[in-house]
Amino acid sequence: MRNVVLARVDDRLIHGEVVTAWIPTTKSNRIIIVDDDVAKDEFNIRVVKALAPGGTKVIVYNVAKASEKLMVQGVEGERILILAKTPTTFNRLIKNGVPLKEVNLGGAGIRGERQPFINNVALDPQEVLACEEMKNAGVRVYYQLVPEQGVIEIDDAVKKAKANFGL
């Protein structure tokens, strides 16, 4: 597998927190965005590539292609930050055999069926179940907005969200 230094859920993908905090802290030199819709939209691909800091290569894949590309041998010195808009995307990667050890929950705004989950993360029922499935598969799923902030484990939030959604 390639050298993944951070797998992060952030529905804004590349933005200030990622550029000014996560990339320098993780020393990432490559960003892989995993999103089925963005991967089909050349305009959005150009936008996210333009937002990355100089020297940081950005690649956009759908889940199937990302699953394949993340499993090959990486190149020396490569440090990958994976960004996806939802925990469901990461759960799909894991189900496809990508051996992620951790998934960081960053920003995910309220929209559709999403309800407040933990701090500035809102999730819908499927996303809550995806977090639970990842945890049951041995993946550490945690909340941390920026590196300077403390880590919050999501076990209690999952239980509360399941109860709220009647799951």
Image (cartoon, helix red, strand yellow):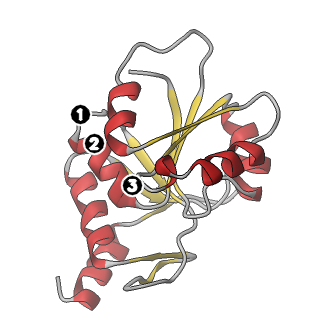
The answer to whether 77 is drawn above or below residue 70 in the figure is above
Q: Tell me if I can see residue 8 in this picture.
A: no
User: Do the numbered discs 2 and 1 sit on residues whose CB atoms are within 8 Å?
Assistant: yes
The answer to whether 123 is drawn above or below residue 133 in the figure is below
> Where is mark 3, residue-wise?
141
* Type of amino acid under label 1: Gly
Q: What number is the disc on residue 94? A: 2
Residue 19, x across and y down, in percent: 75, 48
Image point 23% across, 34% down: which residue? 97
Sort mark 2 into few (<14), some (14-19) or many (20+) by Cα contacts within 10 Å.
Answer: some
| Image-based side of 51 in relation to 149, left or right | right
Chain-order first, disc 2 or disc 3: 2
Real-space Cα distance between discs 3 and 1?
Answer: 17 Å
Q: Nearer the viewer, mark 3 or mark 1?
A: 1
Image point 34% across, 23% down: which residue? 71
| Image-based side of 71 in relation to 16, left or right | left
Between 10 and 21, the residue placed more toward the observer is 10
Q: What number is the disc on residue 97? A: 1
Does dot 1 land on a helix, a strand or a loop?
A: loop
* Type of amino acid under label 2: Ile
Real-space Cα distance between discs 2 and 1?
Answer: 5 Å
User: Do the numbered discs 2 and 3 sit on residues whose CB atoms are within 8 Å?
Assistant: no
* Type of amino acid under label 3: Val
| Image-based side of 45 in relation to 156, left or right | right
Sort mark 3 into few (<14), some (14-19) or many (20+) by Cα contacts within 10 Å.
Answer: many
Residue 79, x across and y down, in percent: 60, 25
Q: Tell me if I can see residue 105 in this picture.
A: yes
Q: Nearer the viewer, mark 2 or mark 3?
A: 2
Does dot 2 land on a helix, a strand or a loop?
A: helix
Between 49 and 148, the residue placed more toward the observer is 49
The answer to whether 23 is drawn above or below residue 70 in the figure is below
